[in-house]
Amino acid sequence: MTELPMFDAGGGSLVSFVRLDSASLEDQGVPSPFACSLVIVQWGQQVLLGFNVSRQQWELPGGAVEPGESAHEAALRELAEETGIRVHRISLVARAEFIFGGEATTYLAAVFAVVLGSPPELVQSDELNSFIWWDPTGELWDGLSPLDAEVIRRCLSHEEGARAPSAPGL
């Protein structure tokens, strides 16, 4: 594992990372502390990455938690909007803290995961206009968000018994 904080070329950083068990803060009736949600979509041994048009890099699907929305709801909405993938069950697996582009503000991200039983039909969006399946044991390359890659690797490096829920029929 890379030591934190770690930085990307745009001045962003991954400040902290904490694995969570399946009991979500939101399940306990606590207001969401998360500013955004990210979704790790697995199929086989690979993870889905989308090319973000505005940031010009490959990254995880996800986005901002809207007012009155839970991090779980935001993850499901963003996944559907950005990729066309519609699932009903995803697991909260981690909390990551980011600082973007030299800002003084830190952002808490809820990281969710889902394992697909078959490859999905992907739909491009205004945000993500292309998709690839990446093997997280592989090399990083120019254009891949190193922060998202680190989050993926940390989420997938846990014991095999704690797997994300499967989404049959996709």
Image (spheres, rainbow, N blue to C red):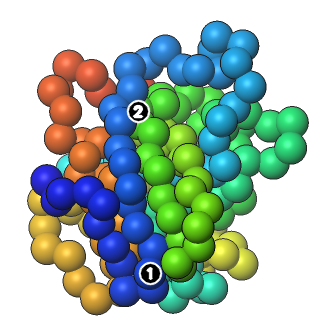
Q: Quadrant of residue 122?
A: bottom right
70 versus 23 height, above or below: below
Farthest-out residue, right: 68
Above or below for 137 versus 76: below
Residue in view at x 55 percent, y 84 percent: 55
In the foreground, 39 or 131:
39
Q: Tell which residue pokes out farthest to the top in this image.
A: 28
Q: Which residue is mark 1?
A: 11
Task: Name the amino acid type tagged 1.
Answer: Gly
Q: Secondary structure at mark 2?
A: strand
**Residue 35: image location, x then y, percent:** 66, 49
Q: Quadrant of residue 87?
A: top right
Judge the density around disc 2: few (<14), some (14-19), many (≥20) Cα neighbours within 10 Å. many
Across and down, in percent, residue 46 comes to 26, 56
Residue placed most toward the observer, 33 or 38: 33
- Residue found at x 64% / y 11%: 28
Work out how far the residue at label 2 is from the one at label 1, CA to CA, in angstroms. 26 Å
Q: Amino acid at mark 2?
A: Val
Q: Residue at x 29, y 66 (%)?
A: 6
**Percent from the top left, x then y, of residue 127?**
66, 75
Determine the residue positioned at 71% across, 78% down: 126
Q: How many marks?
A: 2
Q: Which residue is mark 2?
A: 93
Residue placed furthest toward the front: 104
Query: Which quadrant holds residue 148?
Result: bottom left
First in sequence: mark 2 vs mark 1: 1
Q: Of tags 2 and 1, which is closer to the observer?
A: 1
Can you give x and y, in whole percent of width and height, for residue 74 in the image? 70, 44
